[in-house]
Amino acid sequence: MKTVYDDQSRAVVFGGGCFWCTEAVFQMLKGVSKVESGYAGGNPSPDGEHPSYERVSSGATGHAEVIHVTYDSAIISYEDLLTVFFGSHDPTTPNRQGNDVGEQYRSVIFYSTPEEKTAAEKLSKEVQESLKDGSRVVTQIEPLDTFYPAEGYHQNYFKDNGSAPYCQLIIEPKLEKVRKRFAELVNPEA
């Protein structure tokens, strides 16, 4: 996927479980101008068809639920985004986040440059070294091939459905944790 940026605008693609949760987390951060839910890291469809939620959820495509984050590198760094990524989900559970189970919920960082790959590997190693319980970081670090935007009803899910039970029981507690843990990175209006 080729993207043209201005001097400081950058983008990154992360998969950390359900994209509704990760989208809501990254929408709170200073310097983030856009977060789009979608799919990446799967096999091309033999018929050239865009992956759909139903096909990805079936596990047949190999895609992960991801978010495409556009940010201003003069306000928030790639390393800060990585720190929030690792700190807002469990990078030690393969193909699972909470009750969401399947390859589409894997922990994955898609990089676009060698520098992004190096930074992701470095922080992954630091997280691994900080673990004292014998668990292992299973986050995959892969080159980004293609990002496919998810269907419209998945975009801005928490903002549009904040009173829904899933949002109240699953997403809101995660957001509160991020607000406390990364207060200096959270937009005060979020």
Image (cartoon, rainbow, N blue to C red):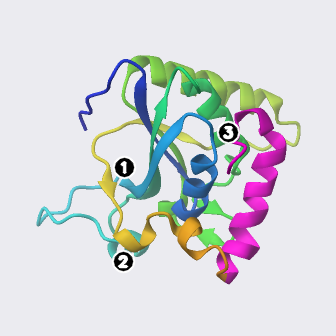
Give the Cα distance between marks 3 and 2. 29 Å
Q: Which residue is mark 1?
A: 41
As shown in the figure, which amino acid type bears the numbered disc 2? Glu
Dot 3 amino acid type: Val
Vertical placement of residue 171 versus 176, above or below: below
Q: Which residues are magenta?
A: 165-190
Image: 95 above or below 157: above
* Secondary element at image label 1: loop
Residue 87 in the image: state x and y as whole percent: 73, 42
Q: Any mark on residue 123, and which? A: none
The one nearer the camera, 89 or 76, is 76
123 on left or right of 49 = right
SS for callout 3: helix
Q: CA distance from mark 3 to mark 1?
A: 21 Å
Q: Which secondary structure dominates the residues rendered in magenta?
A: helix
Q: Which image quarter: residue 142?
A: top left
Q: Which mark is residue 84?
A: 3
Cα gap from disc 2 to disc 1, whole angstroms? 16 Å
Q: Position of residue 16 (x, y in %)?
A: 58, 52
Q: Quadrant of residue 47?
A: bottom left
Q: Sequence order check: which comes first, mark 2 or mark 1?
A: 1
Q: Is residue 115 above or below residue 110?
A: above
